[in-house]
Image (tube, rainbow, N blue to C red):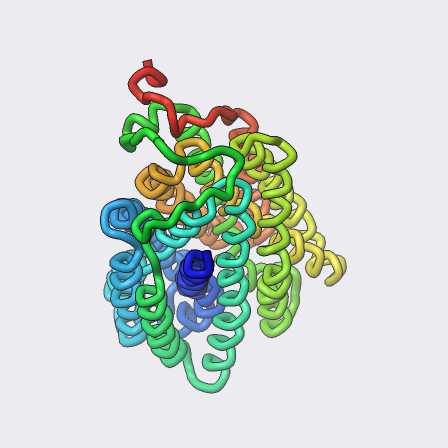
Amino acid sequence: MKKRKIYGYLVVAAAFLAVFTLFGYRSSFSVLLGPMSEDMDWTVGQTTLGYALMMLIYGISAYFSGEIVDRWGVRYAYAVGAIFGALGFLLSSFVNSYMHYLASYAIFGGIGTGMCWVTSTASVRKWYPGNKYATYWGIAFMGAPAAQIITSRGASEIILWMDWRVAMRVLGIGVFLMMITAALISKREPERYGMKIFDGIYSEENQIFWPTLKAFKNWSAVGMTIAFLTCMMAEFTIWTQAVNYWQEGTGLSLSTATNLYILIGVFGLGTMPLMGKVQDIIVSRSNNEVRGRKISLMIAPIVGIIACILMIATSRTIIAGIIATLSFAIYWATEPGAAAGYIGSVFGKKNMGHIWGFATLWSMSIGPFLGSFVGGSIYDITGIYNYTIIFAMVFFLLSAVMAWTLPEEYLGDKDHSEVNK
C-alpha cells in the first residue's frame, strides 16, 4: 500500500512538471509577443502565426503521445518532450528571418509540448480513475498556473533587463531540466507493478479494447471533441491576446496588464485543486461518473463567457478585470480535466491514451490554431480588441451547447461491434 501511494504521488509529480512545461510555453508567448514582433518588425498576426502553427503541430504530436503511453509508457514521451521542447526555445532565440522562426518555434516547440498533455492526463487517470481522478489531476494541473506566474514574470523581467532572445534561452534550459526529471520519476500503469487500483464508482477491470476509429463512431467521442475544440478556440483567443488587450484595449500599462495575466495563475493555484475536488463531488452525487464529467463540461464554458464580459468591463474599473481573472482561473481549472475525465469515464482507463490522444489531435491542433491566429487577425483588421473577445464568447457558448448533447453511458465494458451497429 505504501509503495503504491509513493508511485502514485510520483506520477502526479511528473505530470505537474509536464503541465508546467506545456503552459510555460503558452504563457510566455503572451509576454514575448510584443517585444518579438517589435524587434523583428512583424505584425501581431504574423508573430502569432508561429504560435498557431506550434499548436497545430502540438495537436498532431499529442495523438502520437497517446499511442506511446498505451504501448510503451509515459517515460519515452517525456524524454522526447525534453529534447524537442528545449530546442524549440533555443533555436528560436537565434533566428534572424521569419521562416526560420516559424520552423524552429512551430516544429520543435510543437513536438515538445505535444508530449506533455495527453501523457500527463492519461498517466494520472491510469492511477486514479473514477471519483478520485479530478482531485489528483487538479494537483498535477497546478503546474499550469505555477508556469503562468513564474514564466510570465520571469520572461518579463529578463526582457526588461536584456531581451526576448535571452528569455527564450533561459526557458529552453528550464524545459529540458523539468522534462528529463519527469521522465526519470514517471511510472507506467499500476498493473505493471502488480498493484490494483480501484478508486472509482465502478471497477475498471475486464475492459474491452476500443480501437480509435470504432470509438469515434460514437457521439460520446465526437461530441466531446467538438465541445473541447470550440472551448480551445475561445480560450486561446484570450490567452494569446490578454496582455495586449489589457494594455491597448483598456489603457493599462504593460506592467499592470502583465500582472493581471499573472493573477489568473495566482488564483489558479487555488482553483486547480479546489475545482478538481468539486468535480469529483459532482461525480459522487451523480452516482454516474460520465454524467458528472458532462456537467462540468457544461459549467466551464459558461464561466468562460462571464470572464469575457468582465474582461471587457475592465475599461470601466480594474475590479472587473480582477474578477475576470478569477473567473478565467475557475474555467481553466475545470474544462481540461472535465474533457479528459469524460473520455476516461466513457471508455475506461485502458482505452484512454489513444482515444484521448485522437480527440486532442483535433481539439488542440484546430482550436488553438484558429483561436490564436484569427484572434490576432481580427485586431489587425479592425484595430479593436473587443471584437476579439466577442469572438471568444461565441465559441464558449457553442462549447456549452455541444456538452449538453453528450450521452451519459459507460462503454468501457461493452462490445464495440454491437454498440456501433
The quarter of the displayed image where residue 285 is located: top right
Q: Is residue 62 visible?
A: yes
At 46% from the left and 27% from the top, the residue drawn is 410
| Above or below, 64 relative to 414 | below
Q: Seen in the image, is 267 located left or right of residue 221? A: right
| Above or below, 180 relative to 133 | below
Instruction: Quarter of the image for the C terminus: give it.
Output: top left
Considering every residue shown, the one lying at the far top of the view is 421
Front position in the image: 419 or 259: 419
**In the image, residue 235 lies at what x, y percent?**
51, 49
- Looking at the rendered structure, the number of numbered marks drawn on it comes to 0
Q: Seen in the image, is 389 located left or right of residue 236? A: right
Front position in the image: 48 or 9: 9
Front position in the image: 29 or 359: 359
At 42% from the left and 35% from the top, the residue drawn is 204
| Above or below, 408 relative to 260 | above
Q: Seen in the image, is 206 located left or right of residue 240? A: left
**In the image, residue 131 lies at what x, y percent?**
55, 42
At 34% from the left and 76% from the top, the residue drawn is 173
Considering every residue shown, the one lying at the far bottom of the view is 161
Front position in the image: 123 or 64: 123
**In the image, residue 91 lies at what x, y percent?**
26, 72
Q: Is residue 22 visible?
A: no
At 57% from the left and 51% from the top, the residue drawn is 333
**In the image, residue 168 lies at what x, y percent?**
37, 74
